[in-house]
Image (cartoon, rainbow, N blue to C red):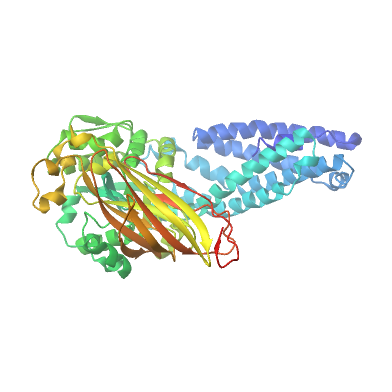
Amino acid sequence: MVVAALGVLAIVGAGAWLAVRAREARSAVEALRVDGKTLQSQLQAYDLTAAGETLTRVRADAQRAHRLTGDPVWGAAGYVPVLGRDLRAAREVSAVMADITGAARPLEQALPRLNPSGSAGDQGQLDVTALRAMADAMPELSAAVSSGAVRVNELDPSGLRPEVADGVTTLNAALKSARGPFADAVPLLEQLPGMLGADQEKTWIVLLQQDAEARGTGGLVGAFAELRTQDGRMRLADAESRGKLDRGPLIPASAVPSSLRAHYGKDLTEWAGFNASPHFPHTGELAASGWHARTDQQADFVAGVDQNVVAAMLAATGPVKVRDVTVDSSNAVNFLSKGVYARWQNPGDVDAVTTELVEAVFGKFSKGEFSLPTLIKSLREPIRERRLLLWANDDEVESQLEQLSISGTIPGDPGPFAMAVINNGGGNKMDAYLQVDTRYDPGTCINSARVGQISVTLDNTAPKDGEGLPSYVNVRTDLIQRGYTGKAVRDGSNRIVLDIYGPVGSSAVLTQLDGTTTVPVTGTDNNHPVWRLSIPIAAGQTRTVNVVMSTPVVEDDAGQIPVVLSQPMVKPATSSAKPLTACKTSSVVGG
């Protein structure tokens, strides 16, 4: 946005006074352009010490340009025909830039204190006072960016000189794109000092979810880490396999709504299945409840991570060695999804190796042996894919987090929505070979309801007959428990428990599996109706579930794009949606 201001402010003034002022304004804007590019490069390189100094110069450049274009004479010249439009644009843009850089002033002192070379070099300590200063500044900065976006958007580039119009258009786009991220950063930054133990020590439970055996929030919890944060430092207190939790006591399921307990049953009381719902706040509540029952201690935060997050962390720490196997960012996903099962056949060994990996990675973070810039960059995609999830035991903090995608919430408001949720029903690791695709067609209107369809395609990409797959991966535990033996229990097949989440207030009119009508088990989760089918699927087989649903019409919803969320899977799930069409006020089919 700084660079874009150049094309707006570089205007040749009219008359001797305006000519002088215009030359001075061009000089200020040129300095703003140069310093703006330098600042951008420094922020991308996370050289925060230099960025703080450059931000001070950028503010001075912007204020100088604002002074030169903001006095009464320049303002009066803005009403001159033709030329006045350019002068008014210059005046408005310079004011916007001065407001934004003025609001960012506290960052000039805070950024150097958060420089990665310092934070990772002092046992991983982050300066929580500097973080708090940033948090205090962010609401005003976010408001300045938001206000600036509105003000620049009101400038009509069609009547401006080409170089000025290009600058207005570019700056307008930059402010619009920055508006959302700045607003999103406010709640997280406000809570971050507390998360890092600025006021008192905090206990974190980090769950490693292994997506090869799917669960609603990602995968089966294979290992966990207990972390403590205080004064900006993180300490690894413990790392264990889930087996330690399995020894009991059971998780008190009363922590979640009765409607959820009715649908997911006793799975919610067991550490092997408590994260069956995709709504991560449920998982957080259950984990904290189970932790308290086990230790009589409070877990302040619960985080869920999967193999992609571990890979991002390894990008920041560098490789670790686990039982003579070097695991790094390039092979971590494959190692945790498939490789660990191929190398170690005994389930106890798999759990032990997974735990050792968790301990090694978090141990490096505890010692400050990581690159903060690399971590931030590497986590962008896992966060976007809902692979890093966070819950807070404090209601006020949690309400702030639930404004962000990292909370893993399933929105409970009316509107077009769909999500295909996979829970492994075969007792194996075959979900590493499952491809899920969800399509949402909002359909047309009949009376006061919209009749649409959610289609979910399941593709088992496992090799024919399960050839070459480790027995631990390929086993059908569900069939063994029913007395089956032989090839049938290790043929690359699987059983999928599919829960389709529909729009709030909707009901299923027709449910089909591969074109044959069937009756789903129905339930409710966070206001959403849930339709469940238990689906056997052979190696190489594709199966399709269609749910035709009736949804109450919401006024003025035409053109709205449905929300289709994807569960984290080893093979990333895909989705598509059609926008809603307008409903006709008719007693017959509309749309």
The quadrant in which the C terminus is found is bottom right
Closest to the observer, 465 or 120: 465
**Relative to 418, does residue 396 appear above or below in the rendering?**
below
Q: Position of residue 558 (x, y in %)?
A: 58, 57
Relative to 41, 151 lies left or right: right
Rendered location of residue 158, percent (x, y): 77, 41
Residue drawn at (17%, 62%) of the image? 249
Residue at 29 percent of width and 64 percent of height:
263
* Picture coordinates of residue 28, whole percent (x, y): 73, 35
112 sits left or right of 391 in the view: right
Q: Is residue 162 left or right of residue 379?
A: right
In this rendering, does residue 475 appear at all?
A: yes
Q: Residue 471 occupies which quadrant of the picture? A: top left
> In percent of the image, x 69 and y 40: which residue is there?
169
Residue at 49 percent of width and 60 percent of height = 415
Q: Quadrant of residue 203?
A: bottom left
Quadrant of res 60: top right
Q: Please state which of residues 192 and 404 is positioned toward the viewer in this rendering.
A: 404
Q: Is residue 68 visible?
A: no
**Along the line of sight, which residue is nearer the eye, 520 or 355?**
520
- The quarter of the rendered structure image containing the N terminus is top right
Front-lying residue, 434 or 247: 434
- Above or below residue 3? Residue 498 is below
Number of disc labels:
0
Q: Position of residue 489 (x, y in %)?
A: 13, 44
